């Protein structure tokens, strides 16, 4: 996945949620155009869940949770894309998240692309919002719970990233438009890839809000709504039937 014929990126990021979609990824970083579908192995020790209650937007977003002792875990599919040598800009953008390195052998590319031998691969894992609030910000206004290094004094077993996260609720629902972005991004790589995404995403709940623009006429704004809804109804039927109109 070269940036040019003369420069090969050594840092890569794995997107496991909304930035799987090309348009969404470009909004986050206009340079992040090329991306390869990938899968993080189960042995990495994290699972993808609806578990990040974002206070600023009052929604429940996707996050990675560390598995507990005796828990099997699961694979995590997404996209792998080149990142700059200096990742501080991404750290600022993903404030409240820890940048965790994924061992190269834990990442499988699912296309013709290959990673350079010296590739370093990272994924962002959220801290619980209460932990971010507890440790506050530094002199620049950046939350101390950000970047690769936890703040001084943090108890990793209790307060570490990927711990203490909460599922969706009435106050923090799962949004259909967020799901649409994730699943439509997966469909860029085929229906089976989208199926895998839904089946390896956990903590679905009845707190699911269909707030698509003109939700009663979704074809006007979400051209793939039929394919997305058919997959959701098939793969998470016990929760899809509780989806509510705004």
Image (tube, rainbow, N blue to C red):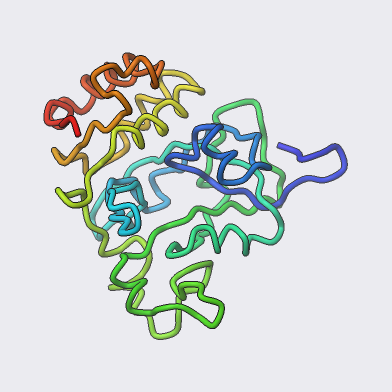
User: x, y (%) of residue 226?
Assistant: 31, 14
Q: Quadrant of the C terminus?
A: top left
Of all residues, the one furthest to the bottom in this rendering is 153
Quick check: 46 above or below 225?
below
Closest to the observer, 154 or 139: 139
Residue at the image point whose x is 23% and y is 24% from the top:
235
Q: Is residue 176 left or right of residue 206?
A: right
Residue at the image point whose x is 12% and y is 31% from the top:
242
Residue at the image point whose x is 34% and y is 60% from the top:
162
Residue at the image point whose x is 53% and y is 67% from the top:
148
Q: Quadrant of residue 133?
A: bottom left
Closest to the observer, 215 or 199: 215
Quick check: 232 above or below 38?
above
Q: Quadrant of residue 5?
A: top right
Q: Is residue 170 left or right of residue 158?
A: left
Quick check: 200 above or below 71?
above
User: x, y (%) of residue 58?
Assistant: 28, 53
Closest to the observer, 216 or 109: 216
Quick check: 159 above or below 236?
below
Closest to the observer, 195 or 84: 84
User: x, y (%) of residue 160?
Assistant: 36, 70
């Amino acid at each position: 996945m070269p940036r040019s014929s003369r420069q090969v990126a050594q840092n890569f990021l794995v997107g496991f949620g909304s930035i799987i979609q090309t348009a969404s990824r470009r909004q986050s970083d206009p340079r992040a155009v090329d991306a390869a579908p990938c899968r993080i192995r189960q042995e990495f020790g994290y699972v993808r869940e609806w578990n990040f209650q974002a206070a600023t937007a009052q929604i429940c977003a996707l996050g990675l949770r560390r598995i507990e002792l005796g828990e099997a875990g699961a694979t995590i599919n997404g996209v792998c894309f080149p990142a700059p040598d200096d990742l501080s800009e991404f750290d600022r953008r993903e404030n409240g998240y820890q940048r965790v390195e994924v061992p190269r052998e834990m990442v499988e590319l699912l296309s013709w692309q290959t990673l350079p031998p010296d590739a370093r691969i990272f994924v962002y894992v959220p801290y619980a919002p209460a932990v971010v609030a507890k440790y506050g910000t530094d002199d620049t206004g950046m939350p101390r719970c950000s970047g690769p290094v936890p703040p001084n004094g943090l108890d990793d077993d209790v307060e570490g990233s990927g711990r203490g996260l909460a599922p969706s609720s009435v106050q923090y629902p799962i949004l259909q438009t967020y799901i649409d972005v994730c699943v439509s991004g997966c469909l860029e790589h085929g229906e089976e890839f989208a199926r895998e995404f839904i089946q390896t995403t956990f903590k679905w709940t009845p707190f699911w809000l269909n707030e698509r623009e003109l939700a009663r006429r979704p074809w006007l704004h979400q051209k793939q709504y039929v394919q997305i809804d058919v997959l959701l109804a098939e793969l998470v039927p016990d929760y899809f039937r509780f989806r509510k109109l705004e």
